[in-house]
Amino acid sequence: MLTKPKSSIFYSRLLVPIRTPSFSLHTTTKSNNVVDSAKTRNKAANLIVYCNTRITQNGRNGNIKEAESIFDNMPVKTTVSWTAMLTAYADNGNISKARQVFDKMPERTISSYNAMITAYNKTRCMVDEAYKLFCSMPERNAVSYATMITGFANMGKFNKAVQVYENTPVRWREPVCSNALMNGYLKDGRLDAAVGVFEGMVDKDVVSWSLMVDGYCKSGNIVQARKLFDKMVERNVVTWTTMIDGYMKMGCLVDGFDLFSSMRKESAFLVNSTTLTVMFEGCGHFDRYTEGIQLHGLVIRFGFEFDDFLGNSIITMYCRFGCTDAASLVFHTMRKKNLVSWNSLITGYVQENQIEEAYELFEKMPKRDAVSWTAMIMGFSSEGQTDKSVKLFRMMPEKDIVAWTAVISGFVSNEMYEEAFHWFIEMLQKSVKPISLTLSSLLSASANLATLIQGQQVHAQAVKMHLEFDLSIQNSLVSMYSKCGNVADACQLFMSIKEKNIVSFNSMITGYAQNGFGEEALKLFRKMQIEGQEPNQITFLAVLSACTHVGLVEVGWEHFKSMKSLYNIEPGPDHYACMVDLLGRAGLFDEAVDLINSMPFKPHSGVWGALLGSSRTHLRLDLAKLAAQQLTQLEPDSATPYVVLSNLYSVLGKKKDGDQLRTYKKSKGIKKSPGCSWVILKDKVHLFLSGDQSHMDSEEIRITLWTIVREMEELVIIQACGFVRKGTVVVFVVMWSLMPLFTWYLHKRLNDDNVDFGHLSERGNDDFAPSWITVYLNRRECVVEESSGQLGRYLYSLAAMPSHLVVPFAGHIDRVPVSL
């Protein structure tokens, strides 16, 4: 770098595009003709301009070696050449090299100083160095002051920015420096301060007006933005595009298209590729297919069809429409494809589950980046091919946190939760810092496993990474604690969220509903409505579930009907299933059947499953047979309809029919999945299957169980374990000393090996004093949780709830603590 020119031959080759055969930089004509001499000087000047332009272009494109080569081999360098090389280094983040160029410049101009100040400003942390250079300038212009103001504003040092602004000579203050300060305020979200600068300006230009229009658009005040826009005497393409973009981002597509039409009427030449890109983004985001097609036709009419930047936007739009064939057609007609082009189409294929097409295109890519690899990893994971996604990840040359997160999220989405945690540990061992999405995926895994301890560890990791106030993390934490049955902590976390969104409310309402707090769920829903938060389909699913648990039929009907009438939300299959469950539990079977018959789509298994469950509860054999018949058609390998119906036959005294159904089930090869439970002790998972005695401590567990039984054989079990029944919920009250016997009493519901193993392991170590023994099950019938050191516990056998609730017991039962 900065060496003498290698040879004039290299330089002459570099300038082939504009050199004529009769001209060489180092040959002089023998003619003393003045005209020939002037032509020679003009050509030499053109060559220097060409080289300067090439240096700038290569710097912007990241080809710094090429820029260096051109600069080093220039026999004549002007101040513009040195400044171009300085800027090329700055654009590629090499500030030290940029400073070397600056220090070696034979002559410095104001532009040279301004370029070096700009280079320092780009690193943000070197704004003080920029200010030192600024103060050392022998003379300055308006750009010098504006550049320094921008540097301080970008760092949030507005006091110093204002100080520089106030020290700016009046003749240079407007509009350039005022625009710089105003832009700084707007980038920092300080709209009022920007308005103050704007209103104090006497000499406003089109940039000043455009900045304020953009500021109002980004703040969501589209009305005020349009008022300013209409007041403008002069508008350029930036102003028009800014206002159109504001409309598009606010979802005001009609206004956006109207303004676009006005723009074309004022001057068709104003429309450029940036304006059209904004239009395509709006069409794609809001699913406006017809308008998108019309715009594409306009692009061809304007002659922009070969614009690479615009072509990428068109590909993205068609992919959002799901029209990958059209996107592919645009892609293959592009003259020059860049990484964005390839990645846009690959991502489109992945979103449409066209994984083979995506991978075929991926294999043809001349160059790949992290986006390309990550898109394919996500694609394979979405198809359940986690082995291929892992293989691809291992082949990835440089793995960033997004790629790690894609693999971990892929395992979570495929219910491979343990693998997700293993990969997370490997990621941490490689010193890769997680992002909010990584931790949110792991919290989802903890919630689905109902492993509170793991969830708390992820929570601690979020605190360690200073991500505990990230909204997505907070929402995931609320969901995790709720699904693990810890409603109190979930509620506390929910209340701590400063700016709650729809996901926040949905997480807490769902948490209340799943844990049996139906009234609390409905109260929170009413509060959400009062605060002006629009509910969505997930919200109503939780609300209807809450109504089911509380038994509020009329309230449930009101909310179900309001989905369409008040919020224009079409009820989905799951909403209908909730309503069938609500009506069935209340014994309103005529209404339930009428609702099923009125569904605008074919009922899915959830609907018939709800009817089957309520028919069993109310001993409605006719409806149970109907629901079971439909379920066997939808899920032919499921044992549930056979088991439920055969049990109902037995309850009704039709043992022969029940036996025949069981025999038929066996002849079809349909097997009921075995009951499964597991307990986590000292960070180790112990799994127990129904009827399985393969655990290494199985014999010792059995001996311990029967020893306890023999010691207490004189006690009457009904005296030891009282219970009350309310609706479909059985509430057991058990003294701590009688817990093992109670567990034995429920061995048909729980795998007794599991609980006894917990007692055996915990009590065999005096140094280990646990606060909880938790039993997890793969069914919803029964969950037992025990607290040592307490007198007793309410234990709930919740037939229709995915979570458990533990409430301290202080004597006798005077009420069921949760309205169910």
Image (spheres, helix red, strand yellow):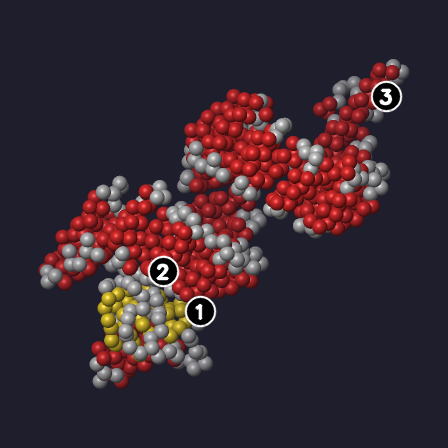
Q: Amino acid at mark 2?
A: Glu
Decide: few, some or many residues near mark 2? Use Cα within 10 Å; few <14, some 14-19, many ≥20.
some
Between 685 and 496, the one lying in front of the other is 496
Q: Earlier in the sequence, mark 2 or mark 1?
A: 2
Q: CA distance from mark 2 to mark 3?
A: 94 Å
Q: Is residue 548 left or right of residue 524?
A: left
Q: Is residue 359 left or right of residue 80?
A: left
Q: Residue at x 75, y 44 (%)?
A: 166
Q: Amino acid at mark 1?
A: Asp
**Residue 683 has which mark?**
1
Query: Quick one: quadrant of the N terminus?
Result: top right
Q: Are marks 2 and 3 in contact (CB under 8 Å)?
A: no
Question: At numbered mark 3, what does the secondary structure look like: helix, strand or loop?
Answer: loop
Q: Which residue is mark 3?
A: 28
Q: Position of residue 695 (x, y in %)?
A: 34, 71
Q: Which residue is mark 2?
A: 520
* Placement of 81 over or under 813, stated as above or below: above
